[in-house]
Image: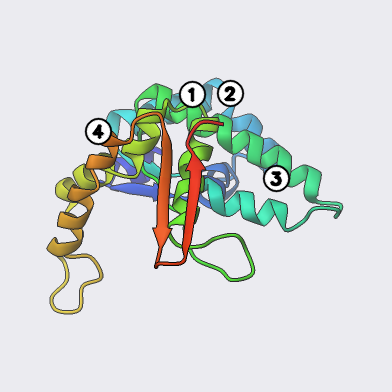
Amino acid sequence: MGGPADAGLGSIEHAAESLLASPIYAGYARDVDEAMAWWQSPTGDDAIAHLAKTGVAVTPTLVAYDAFTEMRVGSADYAPRRKVLAFLLDLTGRLYRAGVIILAGSDFASPELPLIPRESLLREIQLLQQAGLPPEAALAAAGSNVAEWLDRNRPWEPFQQGTAIGRDEVAAVRRSEQLDRVLGPQTVRQCRGRHRCVEVDIHE
């Protein structure tokens, strides 16, 4: 984990595919159980502290793994996936408590899974709270943390025309910083179009 962080990596996406699996990729673990044990060891604590020290942000995308888990209800691998999800929630909480910057993201949209734009981000905020983030920190992960990360890393600069992320998008994220100040510990109301509104209580 130290190599990418020391090389100037700005962020790590996906707690499952990137963080949990990293001891396997590095040859320190042979399977998921050993990888979880690695992260729960003093060596894992050191890796988390190093991420915090280097300022690398983590986007856990817990909502994606949660959706993959719920797909397997009734199957033999449902219980193992639930175990991994519980571990990912615990790992995310440890990252936050160590001072690692947490960003909220939902990974992708899928008509087959409960991953719907906007709604899935609200679910990610809920899961971040389940991981131990206070309500204001979970909201900041979807608002001011993102704006600050974009300002610091400026991902549009290597591109010319056709960049996926530009100054307009950063301005839009900056406006979303109001989420941190206005909503607070209350219900988030997200309307999509004129006909469907979704209320999600950010407290479980």
| Residue tagged 2 | 41
Mark 2: few, some, or many residues within 10 Å (few <14, many ≥20)? few
Element under disc 2: loop
For image coordinates 25% across by 46% down, the residue present is 8
| N-term-proximal mark, 4 vs 2 | 2
**What is the distance, in whole Å, between disc 4 and disc 2 at their CAs?**
37 Å
| N-term-proximal mark, 3 vs 4 | 3
Q: Tell me the quarter of the image containing the N terminus.
A: top left
| N-term-proximal mark, 3 vs 2 | 3
Element under disc 3: loop
Residue 62 percent coordinates (x, y): 54, 46
Residue 148 percent coordinates (x, y): 20, 42
| N-term-proximal mark, 4 vs 1 | 1
The answer to whether the residue labelled 3 contacts the one labelled 2, judged by CB atoms less than 8 Å apart, is no
Q: Tell me the quarter of the image containing the C terminus.
A: top right
| In the image: residue 21, left or right of residue 77 | left
Element under disc 4: helix
For image coordinates 72% across by 46% down, the residue present is 81
| In the image: residue 165, left or right of residue 18 | left
Q: Is residue 20 or residue 111 the one in the foreground?
A: 111
Amino acid tagged 2: Ser
Residue 196 percent coordinates (x, y): 48, 62
| Residue tagged 1 | 45
The answer to whether the residue labelled 1 contacts the one labelled 2, judged by CB atoms less than 8 Å apart, is yes
**What is the distance, in whole Å, between disc 4 and disc 1 at their CAs?**
32 Å
Mark 4: few, some, or many residues within 10 Å (few <14, many ≥20)? few
| Residue tagged 3 | 31
User: Disc number at residue 181?
Assistant: 4
Amino acid tagged 3: Asp
Element under disc 1: helix
